[in-house]
Amino acid sequence: MKLLVVMYSINVFLTFTLSQSGMCRHWWEARRSAEPWRLKLAINGLGLLATSTILFVTVTTKFTEGGWVTIGVTLVFVALCQVVRWHYDRVKQAVKRLDETLLGIPFQPDLNAPTPVKNPSAPTAAIIVRISTAWPFTPC
């Protein structure tokens, strides 16, 4: 139970620190379009300083009491998430290449060609489609 409290406290302040740093980055990038960006950057900068200080103190004081486990588990989880992201990026690129390849094939249907005669002994292709009833479709 004590280890869970240490893990919770470290990861909560890690999350707060990441959120504050993201907000600081946001206000820095929005400095040309947002009018009171300096005040907002200062507020989030103060929050970043406070949360990162608390995170550092918590990690250093609780390191021997399970802080090292928290850091290890969190790093493994982040690495796993990064591997999943890399996989999805590779799949996205493969789908993009497939789309470019398929769109590059010229298609000119012959509208004057007769419809072929039905041949029951010819090879057949089937696409199995599962319709899910779990999704409620509501009219707009």
Image (cartoon, grey):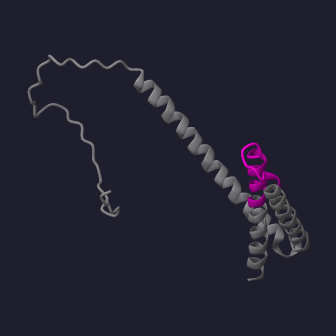
- Most frequent secondary structure within the magenta stretch: helix
Which quadrant is the N terminus positioned in? bottom right
Does residue 31 appear to the left or right of 61 in the view shown? left
What segment is highlighted magenta in the picture?
19-38
Which corner quadrant of the image does residue 8 belong to? bottom right
* 74 or 105: nearer the viewer: 105
Does residue 103 appear to the left or right of 54 in the view shown? left
Position in image of residue 72 (x %, y %)? 77, 63
* 11 or 16: nearer the viewer: 16
Indicate whether residue 51 is drawn in magenta.
no
Q: Is residue 99 above or below residue 79?
A: above
Give the residue at the far bottom of this rendering: 1
Does residue 129 appear to the left or right of 100 in the view shown? left
Indicate whether residue 32 is drawn in magenta.
yes
* 91 or 11: nearer the viewer: 11
Which corner quadrant of the image does residue 48 belong to? bottom right
**Residue drawn 14% across the image and 16% down it:** 112
* 89 or 128: nearer the viewer: 89
**Residue drawn 12% across the image and 24% down it:** 116
Position in image of residue 43 (x %, y %)? 82, 61
Position in image of residue 88 (x %, y %)? 56, 44
**Residue drawn 72% across the image and 44% down it:** 33
Q: How many marks?
A: 0
Which quadrant is the C terminus positioned in? bottom left
Q: Is residue 108 above or below residue 18?
A: above
Which corner quadrant of the image does residue 2 belong to? bottom right
**Residue drawn 64% across the image and 48% down it:** 83
